């Protein structure tokens, strides 16, 4: 039962409501970027695909369902899932706009059931040791140039709310490449999923 629940949660982004019969294969969209330890670059045939991938595979096996993993860029995932070409998406954080398109685990009252989420991600903020940046829990100060971010749009909204300029890292840039730019003083900071 736990594995079936995990599969339902892991694959909660099914478009178009419940199916009348249980599928034997699901086409699952997953970001094509390294989100270790949760998932690694699946397209590269990684030996250790990640915790969330392993959990989804175990749950699917318990339900006699095969997962067809589709490592894709985020915008492609949105397009394919909205058109119905993907059955589900892994790592789709919750927001009200997405809740209109995708199913998320709910409790008996219809409220979002955070206890059934498969992944909890947060962001870490990296600046050089000598940076004037300071955060008092409410206000981020001392940042004048754009902070780079690698994935996700939720961090952009958070940085905007703090009045901090941001810019996406170049496509294909890794966490290490962005951290290196911070370390040598070519970027005032970097925000990454952790």
Image (cartoon, grey):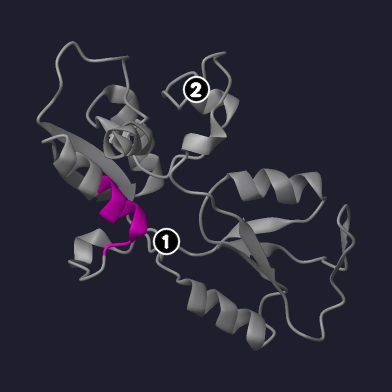
Identify the residue at image location x=62%, y=58%: 123
Is 75 in front, or is 101?
101
Q: Is residue 180 left or right of residue 182?
A: left
Q: Residue 194 appears at what percent x and percent y?
A: 55, 63
Identify the residue at image location x=45%, y=27%: 104
Q: CA distance from mark 1 to mark 2?
A: 25 Å
Q: Is residue 42 left or right of residue 123?
A: left
Which of label 1 and label 2 is nearer to you?
Answer: 2
Q: Which residue is mark 2?
A: 106
Magenta-colored span? 49-56
Is 192 in front, or is 111?
111
Q: Residue 60 appears at what percent x and percent y?
A: 19, 40
The answer, for residue 70, to whether it is visible in the render is no
Q: Residue 168 appears at what percent x and percent y?
A: 56, 58
Secondary element at image label 2: loop
Residue 35 circle label? 1
Within-10-Å neighbours for mark 1: few <14, some 14–19, many 20+: many
Using the rendered view, name the quadrant where residue 81 is placed.
Answer: top left
Secondary structure, magenta segment, majority class: helix
Q: Is residue 135 left or right of residue 39?
A: right
Q: Residue 128 appears at what percent x and percent y?
A: 73, 82
């Amino acid at each position: 039962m736990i594995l079936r629940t995990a599969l339902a949660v892991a694959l909660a982004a099914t478009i178009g409501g419940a199916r009348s019969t249980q599928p034997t294969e699901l086409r699952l969209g997953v970001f094509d970027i390294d989100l270790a330890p949760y998932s690694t670059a699946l397209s590269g045939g990684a030996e250790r695909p990640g915790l969330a991938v392993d959990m989804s595979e175990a749950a699917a096996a318990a339900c006699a369902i095969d997962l067809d993993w589709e490592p894709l860029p985020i915008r492609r995932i949105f397009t394919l899932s909205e058109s119905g070409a993907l059955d589900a998406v892994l790592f789709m954080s919750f927001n009200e706009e997405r809740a209109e398109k995708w199913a998320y685990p709910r409790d008996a009252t219809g409220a979002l059931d955070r206890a059934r989420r498969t992944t909890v991600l947060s962001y870490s903020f990296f600046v050089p040791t000598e940076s004037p940046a300071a955060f008092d829990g409410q206000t981020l100060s001392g940042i004048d140039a754009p902070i780079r971010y690698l994935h996700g749009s939720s961090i952009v909204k958070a940085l905007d709310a703090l009045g901090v300029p941001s810019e996406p890292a170049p496509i294909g840039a890794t966490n290490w490449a962005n951290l290196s730019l911070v370390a040598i003083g070519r970027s005032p900071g970097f925000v990454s999923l952790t």
